[in-house]
Image: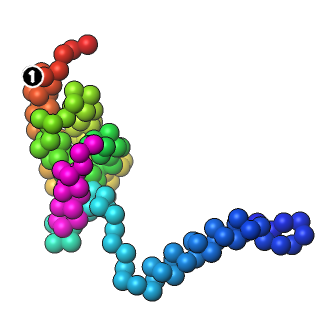
Amino acid sequence: MTIAANGKIQTATLLSAIVALSACLGACASDPPMPPPQAGLRCVDDSAHCISQREKVFDSYMADKSRAWVKQPAAPEAHASGVRLFALSKRRKDLTCDELQHGKREADAAPAALRGPGGKGLTPAQISRGVMLAGDVGRELAKEISKRCRRA
């Protein structure tokens, strides 16, 4: 909190602190909040909970008519979960050439991201599956690009 020279708490700071505290207390008093759908991108094990979270993310991607998710940055866990890569594969016929190119770059970069420092919490099997899926999706996107997109 910020205190003014006369010792009074500034109104805007007090108001924002009250709002933050109310949100925290509201969350503590009710059921635990549901994680945002993107939480499923970091949930990489095969537990029922993680599978459910990944399904929610995938469904939200399939329902997103704007396909804004295509150009959002992806962490190595997102590649290991397979959700983004699988969604790129399933939506490839709907993607613009720019989105296809972006997806191809993501798929091509995924193996290095999975094997790099960002993937250090992943198991070798998770990395391997992610690398194989990225290769498959990269090839599918390349075919779609060659069919529909002009080279600049």
* Number of residue marks: 1
Q: Residue at the location (15% across, 36% down)? A: 94
**Is residue 42 visible to us here?**
no
Q: Residue at the location (21% across, 72% down)? A: 49
Q: Residue at the location (29% across, 45% down)? A: 69
Q: Please, which colouring scheme is shown?
A: rainbow
* Residue 29 spot, x, y in % from top left: 45, 86
Please state which of residues 63 and 130 is positioned toward the viewer in this rendering: 63
Tell me if residue 72 comes above or below residue 49 in the rendering. Answer: above
Tell me if residue 151 comes above or below residue 81 in the rendering. Answer: above
* Residue 104 spot, x, y in % from top left: 22, 32
Magenta stretch prevailing secondary structure: helix
Disc 1 secondary structure class: helix
Graded by Cα atoms within 10 Å as few (under 14), some (14 to 19) or many (20 or more), the crowding at tag 1 reads: few
Please state which of residues 72 and 15 is positioned toward the viewer in this rendering: 15
Residue farthest to the right? 6
Residue farthest to the bottom? 29
Q: Which residue is mark 1?
A: 147
* Residue 13 spot, x, y in % from top left: 70, 66
Tell me if residue 147 comes above or below residue 131 in the rendering. Answer: above
Left or right: 67 in relation to 16:
left
Residue stretch rendered in magenta on the structure: 51-66
**Is residue 111 visible to us here?**
yes
Left or right: 90 in relation to 83:
left
Q: Residue at the location (10% across, 38% down)? A: 136
Q: Quadrant of the C terminus?
A: top left
* Amino acid type shown at disc 1: Lys
Left or right: 77 in relation to 131:
right
Q: Quadrant of the N terminus?
A: bottom right
Left or right: 15 in relation to 85:
right
**Would you say residue 18 sits in the magenta stretch?**
no
